[in-house]
Image: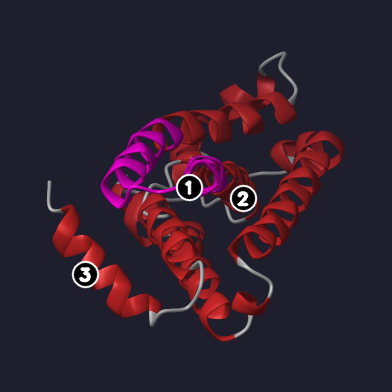
Amino acid sequence: IKSQEVMAVMNALSQNVQGAIVVLACSGICMLASMNDMAAPSMSLEGKNAWIIQSLPVDAKMLLKAKACMQYILTGIPVCFLSICVMIAFKLSFVSSLIILIFPQLYCLFTALFASWIGMMRANLQWTNELYPIKQSLSVTICLFGGWGVSFAIGLLYMYIGHHLGAGIYLLMISVLLLLLSYMIIRYFDHHGNEKLMNMH
């Protein structure tokens, strides 16, 4: 609806750097997606009832992946809608549209897994008010501000360094890194999830 105004801002930010609009659009979408970090406090919210999930006949890796999956679903779908809006508003090429559609989804996958992991590692079950694990816990702070920092860095690094590679290669390299980190977190869930969950108190 306000595509002309948005494009004017994007053109000013891109400083005529080749491919910067695509990268900055991805960076902006990822920054918005970072604000949804429901998996981070979910383990702490178990509170004194953590013994229930510890006694369930379900592997911890499935529980942790389920928490990450819920965040991904509730973030990935709106992000997909936003990506489509950006594609239409900016009148992007087919390749650029694919980048705008796929890259934020990979970012959402990584942040969901990371939020679930940090929520397990920094679980605080000794709260007296539900607002503490939701708004004041260290895991939420790390996910929120860390997500903003990473999103901002993606755009900033391209403007000063990555533009020599081109938007496609630059985002492909970051995508591979995100997939690698996501795989490492999943491997951690598979091999250490049960032990970590049972030792929570």
Measure how far apart labels 2 and 3 are at the Cα level.
35 Å
User: Badge 3: how crowded within 10 Å, few (<14), some, or many (20+)?
Assistant: few
Residue labelled with disc 1: 100
Q: Main secondary structure of the magenta part?
A: helix
Amino acid carrying mark 2 in the image: Phe
Q: Choose the circle earlier in sequence order: 1 or 3.
A: 3
Q: Position of residue 25 (x, y in %)?
A: 40, 59
Residue labelled with disc 2: 114
Amino acid carrying mark 1 in the image: Ile
Q: Position of residue 163 (x, y in %)?
A: 60, 76
- The span shown in magenta is 76-103
Q: Are marks 2 and 1 in contact (CB under 8 Å)?
A: no
Residue 145 in view here: no
Q: Position of residue 44 (x, y in %)?
A: 49, 44
User: Badge 1: how crowded within 10 Å, few (<14), some, or many (20+)?
Assistant: many
Q: Residue at x 21, y 69 (%)?
A: 8
Measure how far apart labels 2 and 1 are at the Cα level.
22 Å
